[in-house]
Every structure is written in C-alpha cells, then in structure tokens.
Image: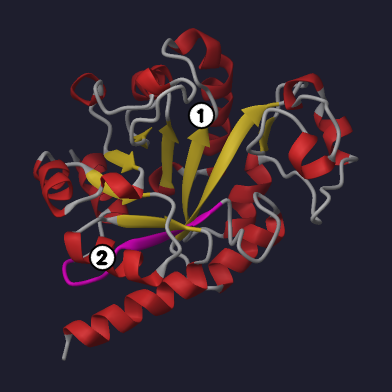
Amino acid sequence: MATQSLRRRTFFPESGEGPLLYAHRGASAHETENTMAAFQRAMADGADGVELDVQLCASGDVVVFHDDDLTRLVGRPERIDQLSLAALREVRLLPGGEIPTLAETLEACGPAALVNIEIKHDGLFPGGCRALVGAVAEVVARAGAGQRVLISSFSPGAIWLWRKIQPDVASGLLFERPRPFHRPWPLRTDVLLPLLLPLAVHPEHTLCTRDSVTRWRGQGYCVNAWTVDAPHRIAALADVGVCGIITNNPASARSALALTRRSAGG
C-alpha cells in the first residue's frame, strides 16, 4: 500500500498544478532523438522527465533506440539486434550523437527525472519480449530508479509480464486511434486494460476528450497523452485533466502551460 501511494504521488500532478511534461525521445525538436544531448537538453528545458525507447542488442545489453534498424538515423541496413554493444559504440548518428545504454541514460538524466521507458515489442504474447523485460528490470534495479520509472508498451504481453515480475514499478499501456492496415492495429487498443490494470494509460492525444479523460481518471488511471507540440493542444489537454503530456519540445510546452495558468488566473 505504501509503494502504491508513493507511485501515485510521483506520477500524478499535485492538485492545481499543470500536467507533467515528458520529453519525447528527449528534447528531440532540438537534439538528435534518444541521445544524451537530447535527454540533457530536456531536463535543462524544464521537462519533468523523458520518454525513451529500449531494445536489446546482440550482446544482450539494453540500448536506447527507437527503430529496429539503422536505416533512418545512420543510413545503414543493420538491425539493432544483430549488432553488439561494442559495434554500436562505433556508430555515429547522421544528425549527430551516439546510441546510449539505458543505464547511462538513467544516470545522465539525474536522480529527480521521471523516465518513461517504452518496451519495443509488437506482439500480443510475452514470450517474445521476456529477455528484454528482464534485462530492463535488472538495469532499473541496479540504478535504484524504480520509484521514478514508468514502463510503457503497445504490447499487452509486455505490460502483463512487467506487472508479473516487477509489480512495484509503475507501468502504462500505450494505445492509439484506429488506423486500418496499420501494423498491428488490433493490439494497439485499450481493450485489455481491465485485465492488465497498469498504473497509467498512454493514449494518442486525439483520443483525449473531456469525457474519456474523466472516465480514465475515474477508474484510477494516470493519463499521459502523446505526442503533442502545438501550444493550443497542450492547453486543451491541460484543461481536460490529463496527468502528463509527452512532447518533442519541453521548453515550448512549459511556456504554453505557464500561459494557460496565467490566463486561468485572470
């Protein structure tokens, strides 16, 4: 009970305060996504925490990288799971920067930063992500970061497995609006929420209406909306009562929230 209470204080904003801000892959509007520079810029720009993506490389290390392969950010076809950490240390991203490990990122963000760790796994069943989930759990435990980490995934299997092996570390289910022919849409919904019962829901921001947010909040969920940069939309999400906003530009989002609070105060 004490652990659950602490988690709620961590991820639910205080009454009267605006939503928490999570920098999407760091301050990716200004720095290369998922790099140390992006995470450090995010914290300097006033983010409450960061959102990042993790997967296993060939040597079994947890690295922070979004895509399955290096094509988009490096111009090479190799998959992350085919390269060792030593090989990835030699990779230079075309926009600038290097691929960090999760352990390095947790340390670089500082002890006060909230860290939303997305488990990159698309499958329904937990077998395909068991090694990744276990490795992430070990890194988080070694860093002593369990109280400030929020594990998220589009995969119900990943959330189920995390809840089974690390029930005291918060988790959240990612989902999005229906997109016909988008892979794999049937798994990227909130239909399994009643079975999973994570601390948080992470809906695409277009799903966040006053009614839906009120319903989720009434069910006890922390509601974190993704991914939003437009000031008017940030203000609207704050108005309907989301707990957190995931944004590429935390400095701009912080300014939008400040302006909203000043306007509300007359």
Identify the residue shown where x is 47% and y is 66%.
Answer: 47
Q: Residue furthest front?
A: 180
Is residue 140 toward the left or the right of residue 67 in the image? left
Could you tell which of marks 1 and 2 lies nearer the N-terminus? 1
Rendered image: mark on residue 29: none
What kind of element bears circle 2?
helix
> In the image, which residues are magenta?
15-24
Q: Position of residue 207 (x, y in %)?
A: 27, 44
Q: Residue 75 falls in which quadrant of the image?
A: top right
Q: Is residue 7 visible?
A: no
Q: Is residue 168 visible?
A: yes
In the image, 265 versus 212, the foreground residue is 212
Q: Nearer the viewer, mark 1 or mark 2?
A: 2
Rendered image: mark on residue 236: 2
Q: Amino acid at mark 2?
A: Ala
Identify the residue shown where x is 16% and y is 67%.
Answer: 15
Q: Position of residue 109 (x, y in %)?
A: 58, 58
Rendered image: mark on residue 137: 1
In the image, 145 versus 251, the foreground residue is 251
Q: Residues within 10 Å of mark 1 (few under 14, many from 20)?
A: some
